[in-house]
Amino acid sequence: MSAFLFIGRRIAAGLAAVGCMLAPAGAQELTRLYAPKPPAGSAYVRVVDLSAGGAPIAIGSAAAAPVPAGDTATIYRIVKGGAPLSVSVGGKAAEGTLVPAADAFSTIVVPPQGPAVVITDPTEGRNDLKAQLRVYNLVPGCAAAVTVADGGPTVFENVATNDTRQRAINPIEAVLVASCGAAVAPPLKLPPLKAGDHYSLFLKPGAAAPSLTGQRDETEPYRGAGN
């Protein structure tokens, strides 16, 4: 056997071994790359029931389910965008015509009385090297602010009623305080957030003072037609 042939066989064997070691990782990447995606024109929608009665919530044709314990909103459901959407709480249809924007995320707020409100969630400014923090002001008649407790910096300011803001933040732990004018909500401690996490804050009306709640954003997976 010539020296060149021997060396060539050793190189081929080495490449084969490397290929075997890389195959599982490559398969995982392909799985993520070719995961089913919703068709163009779809919308991601979640619902906040301001009555907080714990009644099951139905979005479109999906089966009704209560908001998970400790959360304020349902997870994002995949529906047809740009078309009227049916939403019910405890079997009672939400008032108003609800049309979530296509190819976008929306949060629908159902008040105890009156028509529901569709809030289109901002997605600009995404930075996967940081955590994404979003706030919703659901208190009537005020411009809300959110600051870090004990004289810390302002995180959000002048957020109008039924409006939302988003910003990227460093993955830190902090205690936040929200206010509507002179009314101050009890502080909320953020959970540990890492780069790429998405977390929502909800400032809600209360009998004596507004309340500030939070939850991690979660989206249902798309499994194809009939999801």
Image (cartoon, rainbow, N blue to C red):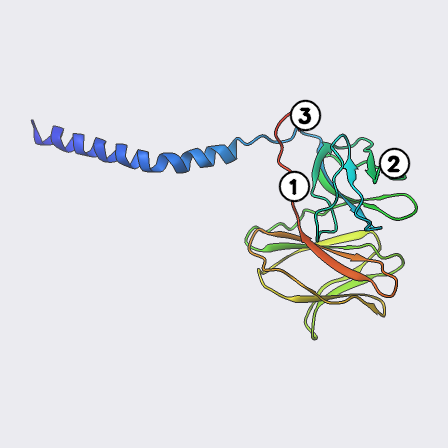
At horizontal 32% and vertical 37% (from top left) the residue drawn is 21
Q: Indicate the position of residue 105 as horizontal and vertical percent values.
A: 71, 41
At horizontal 58% and vertical 63% (from top left) the residue drawn is 172
Tell me if residue 102 can be seen: yes
Amino acid type of disc 3?
Gly
Q: Indicate the position of residue 198 as horizontal and vertical percent values.
A: 63, 51
Question: Measured along the vertical axis of the image, is residue 180 above or below residue 199?
Answer: below
For label 3, the crowd category at 10 Å Cα-Cα, with few meaning under 14, some 14 to 19 and many 20 or more, is few
Name the residue carrying label 1. Answer: 219
Tell me if residue 103 can be seen: no
Q: Indicate the position of residue 30 as horizontal and vertical percent values.
A: 47, 33
Mark carried by residue 97: 2
Residue that lies at the very extreme toward the left in this rendered image: 1
Asked which quadrant contains residue 151, the reply is bottom right
User: For numbered disc 2, what is the local secondary structure?
Assistant: loop
State how far apart marks 2 and 3 are (Cα). 24 Å
Among numbered discs 1 and 3, the one appearing first in the sequence: 1
At horizontal 71% and vertical 51% (from top left) the residue drawn is 71
Question: Measured along the vertical axis of the image, is residue 120 above or below residue 28?
Answer: below
**Relative side of 7 to 170, left or right:** left
Amino acid type of disc 2?
Thr
